[in-house]
Image: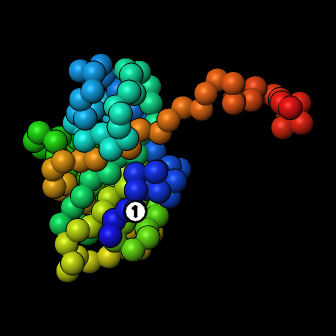
Amino acid sequence: MIEESPEGFIQRWREYAADVQVFARTEGSPLLECLAGSAILQLLDRTGPYQAGAGRRKVILNPMVEALEANPEGQAGLEVSGLGTLEGAGRVVARDGHTSVVDCEGIPLVVVVIGEDGQRFDEGSYVRFRAVPPVHGFVIAEEPRSQRRDAGESADEAM
């Protein structure tokens, strides 16, 4: 099992959400297009009802892969290799079971290995991968303005 619910997945991996530019989309569409670094990604939005508007957003980028491969050259980056898929390379910064967070030139991806025989890599290892479409995206909801505290305001002052 990869996740129990989208909310549980977000709770577990939210600290690795990437800062991306989301493009406008058709109302109600699960297709989310965004700019992450220099790559334009097409994602299956897992956080319906698909109301994230255009603009800067925090999104957990979640590709599925058959396997991670060693990347001894230490290259890093993202390249779109087809509709709804991508190739990536970078350093493993966290790992939990079949899931590894790979930093691809400052863009974190929460990569799930779905192949049973894949090699597992420890934190600090350099890896590369090719995603199996579709790449999933989990949009992190913004806190309502009334729940945010001013940067200089303490918790006591906020009450």
Q: Would residue 77 be seen by someone viewing this image from the given angle? A: no
Residue lying at 39% horizontally and 74% vertically, measured from the top left: 97
- Looking at the image, residue 34 sits to the left or right of residue 147; the answer is left
- Residue in front for this viewpoint, 120 or 30: 30
User: In terms of image quadrants, where is residue 42?
Assistant: top left
Q: Quadrant of the C terminus?
A: top right
- Residue in front for this viewpoint, 119 or 159: 159
Q: Would residue 88 be seen by someone viewing this image from the given angle? A: yes
- Looking at the image, residue 150 sits to the left or right of residue 74; the answer is right
The residue labelled by disc 1 is 4
Residue lying at 44% horizontally and 25% vertically, measured from the top left: 56
In the picture shown, does residue 17 fall above or below 131?
above
Residue 129: % across, % down:
22, 59
Residue lying at 16% horizontally and 55% vertically, measured from the top left: 132
Residue lying at 32% horizontally and 51% vertically, measured from the top left: 62
For the residue marked with disc 1, what is the amino acid? Glu
User: In terms of image quadrants, where is residue 46?
Assistant: top left
Residue 36: % across, % down:
33, 35
